[in-house]
Amino acid sequence: MSAPTREQIATARELLASLGEFGGHVKDDDVAHLEVHGNEVVGAHLVPGLRMDVEELDDGIEAWVRLERGARIAKPVHMCFGMLPEKGLQHIVMHVEAEEGSFASVQAHCTFPNATEITHKMDADIVIGPGATYEYFERHLHGADGGVIVVPKTRVRVHEGGRFKTEFELIKGMAGEIDFDYEVDCDAHSTLDMIARIIGRGRDRIRINETGHLNGEGATAVLQSHLALRDDAVAEIYNTLTASAPHARGHVDCKEVVQDNAVAKAVPVVEVSHPLAHVTHEAAIGSVDSKQLQTLMSRGLDEDAATDLIIEGLLG
Amino acid sequence: MGVLELRDVTLELGDRRVLNGLSIDFWEGHIHALIGPNGAGKSTLAGAIMGLPEYRHLTGEILLDGEPIQDQPVDERARRGITLAWQEPARFEGLRVDRFILAGAREKSRATVERVLGRVGLDPDKYAARAVDKTLSGGERKRVELASILAMEPRVVLMDEPDSGIDVEALTRIFDALADFKQRGATVIMITHSQEVLRHAEHAFLLCDGRIIDKGSVDRIDDYFGESCLSCDHTNDPTLSELVGVTE
């Protein structure tokens, strides 16, 4: 990757400024980072053990990220994807390989502060090597009017003893439309954590499809989706967890708080095909718990403030 | 005149009259106990004073500083200084102890969190960042709730069965907090059917079938409750009682 131009640096700064408190990471030399505006890499910095090649496409970028065997990236890797204009398409194609025994934690921020008609597509394939750990925390920061279609599709393979953890968070701004699709295959003694925390407002449309396959002995997984919906938002959550190996263990947890005219649907599917495997699930959809509400109101909070605090905890 | 007064308060739930023409003065800066058997209407009365929605359709008057509050919602009564410690405190998934405490605190600072947690015997370094959820024991949640009330610095504290489901250590801390409330001039109303809790009050009301059947010194009410109520064979039917000291 070549050094960014003055214009690219200015764009990167504007993009990072839109992240508010989350955009201050690029000053440190020991922090790897990548900033992509539309289809243009406007900032990047690597650290030893992390390799990254990026190719600019007509409507986005294609990136190859490799964590070298045994590399331990001490500080979180920051990635920022976004678009400052009101309209457009950003397509991110990402290939990630975490080689044996490596470790990295990625903090990805997706920002569309002025969006009225933007599509953000992500197609990722991720391979976690034996004993490697790859954590991917994705925070979306949208404008107040929605106008973003977010379509992340990810396929993951976690080899023996590996660990994959992903958290998807959209709490600030209106979601717009989200169609989230993750599918993960887990080998023996590997670990999977998939967490989604989303607040839907206005006329947001949210669809989450999380699937984990516990194929190897002793593999474990937790799929967790916590959503709060208000106004006319609609959400459908499909959590699927299959277990086909001895001592595979898994849990599916879906909680949705619904207010106003919002509509929520949760479909947890668990499939166990080995007698020594064990998978549990819980799904709860409802309004804010009245006892929690009354407790906070008996401390002087009005109903809206109490509701916000309860939801903050649920999604925190 | 008390800081909090009930005037002929009656409440019916379904076809049952659970509060029956109650008139009570709660004196400012005193620790009061409302004692009575299960089903006497004690917790309902606490909920009615707090203004919980299911108990709002009462008749009569509830006065704070002489002003009627029975039409005010819970949060407005709380902002005027009334609060409730629940018999079984709510669990809040993911909500941190410090956020919970500061939600209603008069002074919103880390120092407040440390002070009130320390007062109820919980180490702030260990508890402030924990969630107010099922990972806390019943006694710990009860102490966290009390800490949140200490931070709020209320004028009237309703404590519903403060000894319910907790260990000796937690109960000791709750009694310590009573001293704090008393020192600050707050009025405490403890709902209980425990004689141990009753003995920490300064003044007591005996409730049966939604009616006050006696009031007065803790010793006298304690004696009567121990001798007559605990072995009563007609619970919540006080018309059958040979009352020793009906004052209303």
Image (cartoon, rainbow, N blue to C red):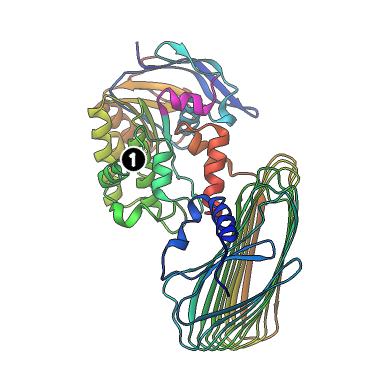
Query: Residue at the location (49% across, 89% down)?
Result: A69
Relative to residue A180, is residue A11 depicted above or below? above
- Element assignment for label 1: loop
Residue B81 part of the magenta segment? yes
Rendering coords of residue A4 (x, y %)? 56, 66
* Chain holding disc 1: B
Given residues A21 and A200, the one toward you in this image is A21
- Residue B177, given in percent of the width and then of the height, sits at 27, 38
Amino acid at circle 1:
Ser
Please report the residue visible at 61 percent of the width from the left and 86 percent of the height from the top.
Answer: A276
Image quadrant in which the N terminus of chain B is located: top left
Q: Quadrant of residue B42?
A: top left
Whether the magenta-drawn stretch holds residue B152 is answered as: no
Total numbered labels placed on residues in the image: 1
Q: Residue B168 in the image: state x and y as whole percent.
A: 28, 51
Observer able to see residue A266: no
Q: Which residue is mark 1?
A: B109
Viewer-side residue, B169 vs A137: A137
Left or right: where B66 falls relative to A175: left
Residue B25 is drawn in which quadrant? top left
Residue A66 seen in this snapshot: yes
Q: In front: A13, or A180?
A: A13
Q: Which residues are magenta?
A: B72-82
Residue A170 in which image quadrant: bottom right
Quadrant (top left/top right/bottom left/bottom right) for the C terminus of chain B: top left
Q: Position of residue A301 (x, y in %)?
A: 49, 33
- Mark 1 crowdedness (10 Å alpha carbons): few <14, some 14-19, many ≥20: few
Could you tell me which residue is drawn at 46 percent across and 30 percent down? B46
